[in-house]
Image (spheres, rainbow, N blue to C red):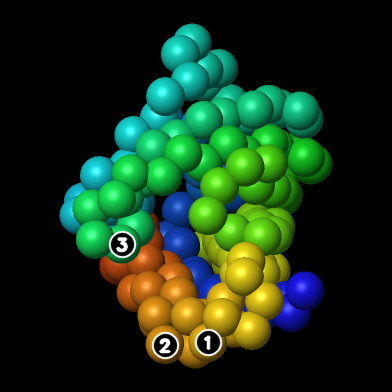
Amino acid sequence: MKKYELYRETILPITLLEAWDFFSNPSNLSKITPVEMDFKVVTKGLPRHIHNGLIIEYVVRPLASVPLKWLSQISSVNAPHSFVDEQLKGPYAYWHHEHTFEEKDGKVLMIDKVTYAVPFGIFGQLANKLIVRSKLEEIFNYRTDRILEIFKTV
């Protein structure tokens, strides 16, 4: 299985605790996901903040409005500095997303490191080259813009 990596750094004009409060709340993911993906949290009664072992089910429409179920687990939490979510079931053969928050000069350096693999062997590698990678870049570009927009008002 060929794995790929997406890496992003974003400087947030907020404190470490404000960053943690926002990003550790699973309900906020829909606020930073492109509207056309029609992202919905299916899991009822989610806690205000994530914890180790938390399982969350979503429905998302990443391509051609086809709904896909995505089941993820929070596999590691080191509040307020980092957490990891991993796909248990969904569109990827492998998904591991590390979220890291580091206070720097009165702001927060947020790092997203996504390691992923596309199913279907060589056909998946071709799909990654033609569609998947650019779609992920587009999603994370939107996410960065939206996050900065949200925190400008803080």
Q: Closer to the camera, 84 or 19?
A: 84
Residue 94 placed where, x, y %?
A: 69, 60
Q: CA distance from mark 2 to mark 3?
A: 13 Å
Of the image marks 2 and 3, the number of the one nearer the N terminus: 3
Q: Amino acid at mark 3?
A: Leu
Residue type pointed to by label 2:
Leu
Instruction: Return the mark for residue 78.
Output: none
Query: Considering only order in the chain, which callout, 1 or 3, is on the residue closer to the N terminus?
Result: 3
Q: Residues within 10 Å of mark 3 (few under 14, many from 20)?
A: few
Q: Is residue 131 above or below residue 142?
A: below
Numbered disc 2: secondary structure? helix
Asked if residue 150 is positioned above or below residue 134 in the image, the reply reads above
> Which mark is drawn over residue 130?
2
Give the x, y percent position of residue 69: 46, 39
Q: Residue at x 23, y 53 (%)?
A: 65
**Figure quadrant of the N terminus:** bottom right
- Across and down, in percent, residue 122 comes to 64, 84
Numbered badge on residue 63: 3
Say what amino acid the circle numbered 1 marks. Leu
Q: Nearer the viewer, residue 125 or 43?
A: 125
Mark 1 neighbour class, 10 Å CA radius: few under 14, some 14 to 19, many 20 or more: few
Q: Which mark is residue 126?
A: 1
Q: What is the distance, in whole Å, between disc 3 and disc 1 at their CAs?
A: 16 Å
Who's the residue at 68% across and 26% down the image? 54
For the residue carrying disc 2, how many other residues have a C-alpha within 10 Å: few (<14), some (14-19), or many (20+)?
A: few
- Tell me if 151 is positioned left or right of 122 in this view: left
Mark 1 secondary-structure assignment: helix
Q: What percent of the width, then of the height, locates residue 109?
A: 58, 67
